[in-house]
Amino acid sequence: MLAMKLVVNQQAPTTGADGGASCCDELAPLVDRANQGDRAALESVLGAVAPAMLRMVRAVLGPAHPDVPDITQESLMALPGALTTFRKESSVKQYARQVALRIALSARRRRKVREKLFQGWQNLQQEKAEMTGPHAYHTLLVERRAALLRDLLDELPEEQAHSFAMRVLLDYTLPQVAAATDATLNTVRSRVRLAKEKLRERLEADPALIDLLREGDS
């Protein structure tokens, strides 16, 4: 939606509250209309709550975190579905902040798990290198593979990075990744495919790392 595309990159206001009863009174009727299929009303709600959601994501991940735009976008995309169960026990903005908080915390946990998996994978690769020769060459290759994979995971959207990391670092099958991430098989297949396309671009400059791409194959 247009509102989603515009607000993610906006600078969040540095002053001012998220709104109290008056804000809730203004947005609640729009939520009712949005839940009845009024697209314009939904976009108005998204535009009104987006700065508050952006501030929440920044608070959880850090203001300079590279995933802030993607997680904010994910939060905005999740909000329409969440609004169907909105009970008006808080302001609409406060409810939207709760949605953003849940998604940002989930993303933060996924990133920590991914980093732990990556470190274990890197250690395993190093151990393998020490058992083969020439040692210096294999150690260099491990370092290059690790640097490439870390950079790739940092650049990918969060969901793509998590799915690809599970596929490569844990050697999960695509159905296993789908089950672990609560996503459809086609969604996971698409995420891994997009990640592999990005990796393939990197490999054009470093063919020695082609086995990383094979590890992501289904």
Image: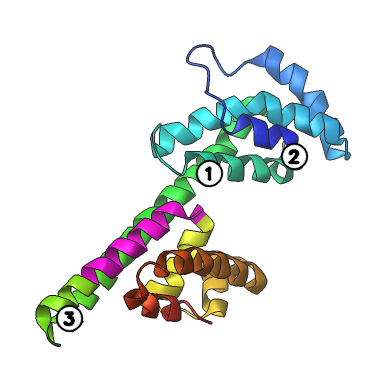
Query: In this orientation, which residue lies closer to the viewer: 153 or 186?
Result: 153
Query: In this orientation, which residue lies closer to the viewer: 177 or 65?
Result: 65
Q: Examine the image and state in which quarter residue 188 appears.
A: bottom right
Determine the secondary structure under disc 2: loop
Relative placement, left or right, of 55 versus 87 is left
Pointer 2 local density, CA inside 10 Å: few below 14, some 14–19, many at least 20: few
Q: Which residues are magenta?
A: 142-158
Q: Which circle's residue, 2 or 3, is located before the other in the chain?
A: 2
Q: What x and y, as percent, mark residue 16?
A: 53, 11
> Mark 1 belongs to which amino acid?
Ile
Magenta residues: mostly which secondary structure?
A: helix
Q: Examine the image and state in which quarter residue 41 appears.
A: top right
Q: Is residue 44 above or below residue 125?
A: above
* Mark drawn on residue 1: 2
Relative placement, left or right, of 112 versus 17 is left
Q: Which circle's residue, 2 or 1, is located before the other in the chain?
A: 2
Q: Residue at x 43, y 56 (%)?
A: 110
User: Rounded to the nearest whole Å, what is the CA distance between mark 3 and mark 1?
Assistant: 37 Å
List the residue tagged with mark 1.
Answer: 71
Q: Nearer the viewer, mark 2 or mark 3?
A: 3
Determine the secondary structure under disc 3: helix
* Mark drawn on residue 129: 3
| Figure quadrant of the N terminus | top right
Q: Is residue 111 above or below residue 215?
A: above
Q: Examine the image and state in which quarter residue 23 appears.
A: top right
> Mark 2 belongs to which amino acid?
Met
User: Rounded to the nearest whole Å, what is the CA distance between mark 2 and mark 3?
Assistant: 49 Å
